[in-house]
Structure formats: C-alpha cells, structure tokens
Image: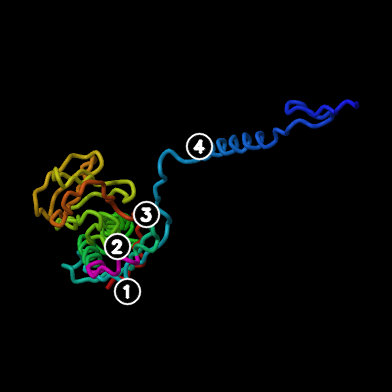
Amino acid sequence: MADEEEEPTEEGTEEGAEPKSKGPLKLLVGVVALIATGAILAMMAVPSKEKLPVFAGPSMHTFFADKVVGNPLDDNYSRYLSFEPSCSFLAYDLAYPESRRIDPHYETWLRESFQAALARYRIADIMSGSTPGEENSRPEFAAELEALAEPILFPVHLGETAAPYDPDPSSGLRLGDSQDRDGTFRGAFWEHVLHVDAKAMTLQIGEGPVAEFSEGDYDVLVEAEDGTKIYVDTSELQEGFEGDVQVGVMGRIRRMFTGGFTAQ
C-alpha cells in the first residue's frame, strides 16, 4: 500500500514561498509621519499674533476744486490772498480722502479753518520770496494748515463705520457731540480699541483710565493713556453689550502743500 502524501499544516509553508509583505504597514506609518510633520510645520508657520492692517501710500489729495480766498492782516483785512492747498497722506484705503467729500460739512469746515488761519498772517510773511531781511513764515503757515486739516480729513471712527458719525453696528455707540470741537485722540484705527461694559457702565481706551457713564449720556469723555480725548454717545448702547470696539483714525497727513499764492 502506497504511502499517502502528507498535507502541509497551516503553520508550514511550501519551499521557496515568499513571506507575507509588510508594505501596507510601512506605507501607513509613513503617511502618519508625513501628516504629523506637515501639522508641525503648519503650526510653526502661523504667526503668534494676527498681523494688523497698516497705512498705505503716500498718495496726494487736493482739498478743493477751486482756490481758497481769504483776507490776511494787511491793511485792516482789505487785501486778498488765494492759494491751492493739497497734501500727501498715508491711509488704510487711499480712496478714503475722496470719500470725505460726501460729508456736507467737510469742505465748508476746511475752507473756514484755512481762511481763519490766513487772517493771522501778513502777505509778505507767507509768500515765497518775501522782502529780504524779513522772516519767511510759509513753513509755519503750512504747519498750521496741517494741524487744522488733519482731524477734518481723517476724523476718528468708532467702530467699522462708513462715515465717522454713524453708529457702530455692533454696540450702538457713536461719537459724542463735543468730538469735533474738543476731541484730540489720533491713534490709528486698527491699533486701538474701546473696552465697553454696558452692565458696569464703563468705557476705557486701551490701558487708559476707566470712564463711567449713566443711562442716556451722549457726550462721555474718555481719555487714552497719553491724555488725548474722545467723546462718546452712549444713548443707544445695546443693552448688556460687553466687548471691544475699534477706535481711531483711518490715515494721517504726511506733508502739507500751500501751492501758488496770488495776492490782490
């Protein structure tokens, strides 16, 4: 009787057969390592602090389509002097100065401010090529115009508003009645916040002093750390609002130009 062939057991393998491949396992480990490395690199690439918008420019802005005409000190204000003021500026949005023309007070406020400044000078004091030996005050005059123009061209905004006196959509706050006359804060908009606590009824610019207000206040004085001031209308503050509202200007004048003078 012939011997029966012995079948291989489950543990045995045929001679010359290749062992099972570990390729899928190695591939899986590699993918996991790649994902982990990518995540680490991504975390390293994320800045620790969100990058804030910065002023662009410089660019140019001409204040009026026509000349400014005013009366200087000469001959008891009976003389006339005309000039064409313009400026170079920096701003978050270089179209912002042109948007100020929508404000019905913009050009009137500027023109009257420039005319009032002109009334403090004599023609020879501010025109180039003034009489030899006399001080040329043209740079001083230009600096005065710049100080007058900047808060009109770049007024403070409270919240992300289209116009400076619009109410902030998130909090209901707006600039107070005294802002145009007495406001002195000139911080850049994206670098400063107003801390608002409707429950405690307090306002605070950055780390400046805390200002308290009462219900219905429409002209609350709030000081920054450097002592500059803004005035805030809280009469429409949303009930229970607590948070930060951006506050500041959208640009600044870089240099003022008086243009050519014409005297009469």
Q: Which residue is mark 3?
A: 254
The alpha-carbon separation of the residues under discs 3 and 1 comes to 22 Å
Marks 1 and 2, the one that precedes in the sequence = 1
Q: Which residue is mark 1?
A: 66
Which residue occupies 20% across, 60% down?
120
227 with respect to 93 (left or right):
left
**Callout 2 amino acid:** Ala
The alpha-carbon separation of the residues under discs 3 and 4 comes to 37 Å
Vertical position of residue 1 compared to residue 132: above or below: above
The alpha-carbon separation of the residues under discs 2 and 4 comes to 37 Å
The alpha-carbon separation of the residues under discs 1 and 4 comes to 55 Å
Mark 4: secondary structure: helix
The alpha-carbon separation of the residues under discs 3 and 2 comes to 23 Å
47 with respect to 261 (left or right):
right
Q: Please tell me the numbered disc located at residue 162.
A: 2
Q: Which residue is mark 4?
A: 44
Which residue occupies 12% across, 44% down?
212
Q: Label 4: few (<14), some or many (≥20) within 10 Å?
A: few
Q: Is residue 142 magenta?
A: no
Mark 1: secondary structure: loop
Mark 1 touches mark 4? (CB < 8 Å):
no
Which corner quadrant of the image does residue 224 belong to? top left
Q: Please tell me the numbered disc located at residue 187.
A: none
**Callout 1 amino acid:** Asp
The residue stretch that appears in magenta: 98-108
Q: Nearer the viewer, mark 2 or mark 4?
A: 4
Q: Is residue 101 magenta?
A: yes
219 with respect to 65 (left or right):
left
